[in-house]
Amino acid sequence: MLKLAGSTKPGDAAYEEISYPIAHRVLHKCDAVLRIEGASNGADIETAKAKEMGLKIYYRLEDIPDAE
């Protein structure tokens, strides 16, 4: 979809227009988010959105409880 929309790299206008809305919709299917360390404006936006939705945010794999 991104290529068809004219995106040539992450962060360009087409990427921003398509990727974030899709990611926001996917969050509605999530129970939690793992925020991997490192600078990422997109990850920061998604983490903030997840917090607004009341989702649990994990910052380390070892903090995620075992699924049963």
Image (cartoon, rainbow, N blue to C red):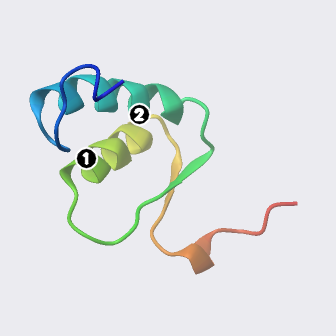
Q: Which residue type carries mark 1?
A: Gly
Identify the residue position indicated by label 1 in the image: 42
For disc 2, the neighbor class at 10 Å (few under 14, some 14 to 19, many from 20) is some
Tell me where residue 16 sits by quadrant.
Answer: top left
Q: Can you name the residue that lies furthest to the left here?
A: 13
In percent of width and height, residue 4 lies at 29, 21
In percent of width and height, residue 10 lies at 20, 44
Tell me where residue 67 sits by quadrant.
Answer: bottom right
Say which of 8 and 65 sits in front: 8
Identify the residue position indicated by label 2 in the image: 23
Horizontal side, residue 20 vs residue 55: left or right: left
For disc 1, the neighbor class at 10 Å (few under 14, some 14 to 19, many from 20) is some
In percent of width and height, residue 40 lies at 22, 57
Residue depicted at x 45% and y 69%: 59
Horizontal side, residue 51 vs residue 56: left or right: left
Residue depicted at x 61% and y 32%: 29
Quadrant where the N terminus sits is top left
Could you tell me if the residues under marks 2 and 1 are in contact, i.e. CB atoms within 8 Å? yes
Q: Can you name the residue that lies furthest to the top here?
A: 5
Q: Can you name the residue that lies furthest to the right here?
A: 68
Marks 2/1: CA–CA distance: 10 Å
Q: Can you name the residue that lies furthest to the bottom here?
A: 62
Say which of 52 and 62 sits in front: 62
Q: Which residue type carries mark 2?
A: Ala
Element at badge 2? helix
Residue depicted at x 34% and y 24%: 21
Horizontal side, residue 48 vs residue 60: left or right: left
Tell me where residue 14 sits by quadrant.
Answer: top left
